[in-house]
Image (tube, rainbow, N blue to C red):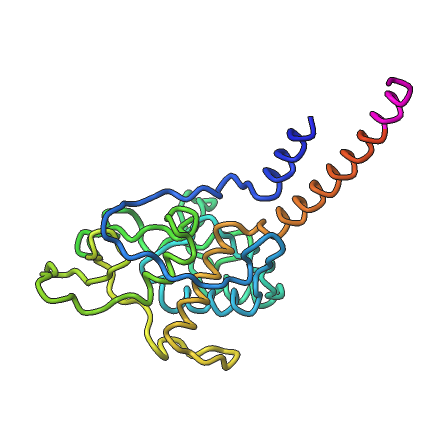
Amino acid sequence: MRKFFLIAAFTALFASPLATPVALAAGDVEHPLEIKWNHGGVFGTFDRAAVQRGLQVYREVCSGCHGLKYIAFRNLLEIGLNEDQAKAIAAEYTMIDGPDNEGEMFERPGKLSDYLPSPFDNEMAARASNNGALPPDLSLMVKARAGAENYLYSLLVGYSDAPDGVTVAEGMNYNPYFPGHQIAMAPPVDDEAVDYIDGTKNSKEQIAKDVVTFLAWAAEPTLEARKRMGVKVVLYLLILTFVLYLVKRKVWADVH
């Protein structure tokens, strides 16, 4: 019984419906760089400033090709933006709505209840704009790749020239962290690719870390709440185990 409680406690603390990454491939892929993330560990929390900078990177660099279909503009309130800021961001997007009273679809500015729109109308349009490659939606990307944040960070900063003897196909780029080492996506970030609103130094490494932090939040906005609940469950089960132990001693005290 005690083992059961301990297993249940640690399962509640560390498990998540999205916590198991999907392996892509084995072979000679470089092992991802090991980065310390503020939201890692049992008591880790998201760095709100980094998440907001990551949102800026996503909007200015990534959103031209990649969608974020599971995030609504109202979710941006959770990363420290106030309502006016979130509404201003939403209003920058044009949404298709309707039908109106005449049965026609119409355009309107985005609002908090809308989800971030895809940059393309459909899959074929996305492929046509990217030489046949389909840019994946980034909503769950951190959870969908083995190595999670470390893999995405390594991928973003890992572009390099191909070593001697390696031929890179036309339209492809060499990246030792990508399965097969050849990736259709051009290097998305570089030094000074984004001018941060808060004045943070905009090195390639900083930009990559910020956008990956944002994507980690997008993949699991409830991470902090889950950890808090997990700690409460562990404490409750520890207290319950202690109480049950005292009850057991009391019940069997007269048995020799």
Which residue is nearer to you in this view: 135 or 168? Answer: 168
Q: Position of residue 64 (x, y in %)?
A: 33, 62
Residue 255 on the magenta segment: yes
The image quadrant of residue 194 is bottom left
Which residue is nearer to you in this view: 67 or 218? Answer: 218
Establish if 83 lies above or below 13.
below
- Residue displayed at 45% across by 57% down: 215
Q: Position of residue 99 (x, y in %)?
A: 44, 44
The image quadrant of residue 81 is bottom right
Q: Position of residue 210 (x, y in %)?
A: 46, 67
Q: How many marks?
A: 0
Would you say 256 lies left or right of 66 here?
A: right
The quadrant the N terminus occupies is: top right
Residue 11 on the magenta segment: no
- Residue displayed at 57% across by 65% down: 47
Establish if 241 lies above or below 111.
above
Q: Residue furthest right?
A: 254
Which residue is nearer to you in this view: 60 or 21? Answer: 21
Would you say 77 lies left or right of 165 here?
A: right
Q: Tell me the magenta residue range.
A: 247-256
Q: Residue furthest top?
A: 255
The quadrant the C terminus occupies is: top right
Q: Position of residue 90 (x, y in %)?
A: 50, 61
Which residue is nearer to you in this view: 196 or 88? Answer: 196
